[in-house]
Amino acid sequence: MLKAINLRKEFTNVIAVDNVSLEAQRGEILGLLGPNGAGKTTTIRMILNILQPDSGTITFDGNPFDESIRNLLGYLPEERGLYRKNKLLNTILYFASLKGIDAAEGKRRAYKWLERFDLLNKYQSKIEELSKGNQQKVQFIISILHDPELVILDEPFSGLDPVNQILLKDILLELKQQGRAVIFSTHQMEQAEKLCDKICLINKGSVVLDGELSEVKSRYGKNSIHIEYDGDGSFLKDLPFIQQATVYQNYAELVLKNSISTKEILSVVSDKLDVRKFEYVEPSLNSIFIEVVGLPDKNEEPIVLSVPTKPQQPSIFQNKRVKRELISVIIFGSVSLAAFIASFFVKSLSLTTAGIFFLGTIASFIKFLYVRKKALIEMKNREKEERADAR
């Protein structure tokens, strides 16, 4: 279905994607994995023709991207892309119309998906009245309403509670069974492990690991053990025969450095822990991710681009309504002042005329204050929404 070969994208000071190749086939789910800032979203935007690669090729069933392919793609972006003041159903129908679906068919499909996501009773609600999780459901519905052959999902589980995560997982498996190709981008390794047939792990813009998930896990599964216990397992990280330890509250996943017998391990561990379960296992995708990518280096200096250290807040006077009312105040004030001065030199002009213009200036100024206050409230509300979405 999709084949991307040797993609490269460089921005002013950063190589965002460097020689990335991947392939997504119908009837499978490909996990596009990596830490934040690895280049996943840039890769997706090149696949969707939002960004043009500096080099490399992208084909769909052997053909380069053109407008006839656009409707074969479904895309769920990580960012919110909904019109917050619009009603839920109208929003879905608008995006359906962009994909060539008429109103009647759009409503039929919309009602089906709204019912499945338990949103049918909210179809008249405004988008801004929905929770973050429900907004994510709406965006997902929009991405698949037109029955795309390739579905690209960027952090689809963001904002969803455990029940809705299960529902979304079931739908993705259904899409796979229907022969759709699915690219699933995330840094949540647990979800990727449950869903993906293949993975492509990107770090710092380059592919560091790819292939069938089962084959990848077998490569890293020779010396991994899983322990469930009661007690404080924090010491496990410091044992000399442990290469890597992922320690949780009551269980741990350990990667051994060398061959060591079960008896030797248990003799050390059982002195400090009440071991309830001990077994050799395949490593989790999370532990493979940590082994390949590594933990963040605290001493590593981040890449700094030529941007201000503090985001510049937009001025209230950039608001068109505020600017228009301010101009009105200036005009009335100027005319009022001119009329007042002229009344002393031109007999046909009286102070009454100047007074009328002065009253107009006051009225215009009052309106300016009202519009400015309203614009400030809207600006603060937008900032709150952006902060909430960032969380």
Image (cartoon, rainbow, N blue to C red):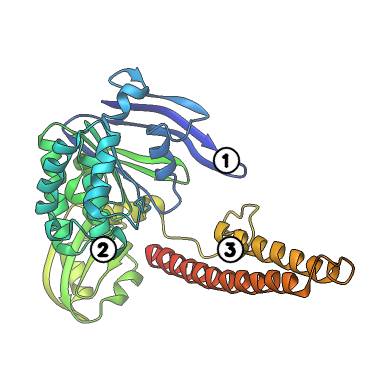
Q: Tell me if I can see residue 310 in this picture.
A: no
Mark closest to the chain's N terminus, 2 or 1: 1
Dot 3 falls on a residue whose secondary structure is helix
- Front of the two marks 2 and 1: 2
Question: What amino acid is found at the position of numbered circle 2 in the picture?
Answer: Leu
Residue 11, numbered circle: 1
Residue at 57% in and 44% down? 14
Residue at 20% in and 60% down? 225
Residue 130, numbered circle: 2
Q: Quadrant of the N terminus?
A: top left
CB under 8 Å between callouts 2 and 1?
A: no
- Front of the two marks 2 and 3: 3
* Residue 22 drawn above or below residue 227: above
Q: Quadrant of the C terminus?
A: bottom left
Mark closest to the chain's N terminus, 3 or 1: 1
Q: Tell me if I can see residue 9 in this picture.
A: yes
Q: Position of residue 20 (x, y in %)?
A: 42, 34
Q: Which residue is label 3 attached to? A: 322
Q: Nearer the viewer, residue 312 or 35?
A: 312
* Residue count near mark 2 (Cα–Cα under 10 Å), binned few <14, some 14–19, many ≥20: some
**Quarter of the image where one finds residue 267:** bottom left
Question: CA separation, marks 3 and 1?
Answer: 36 Å
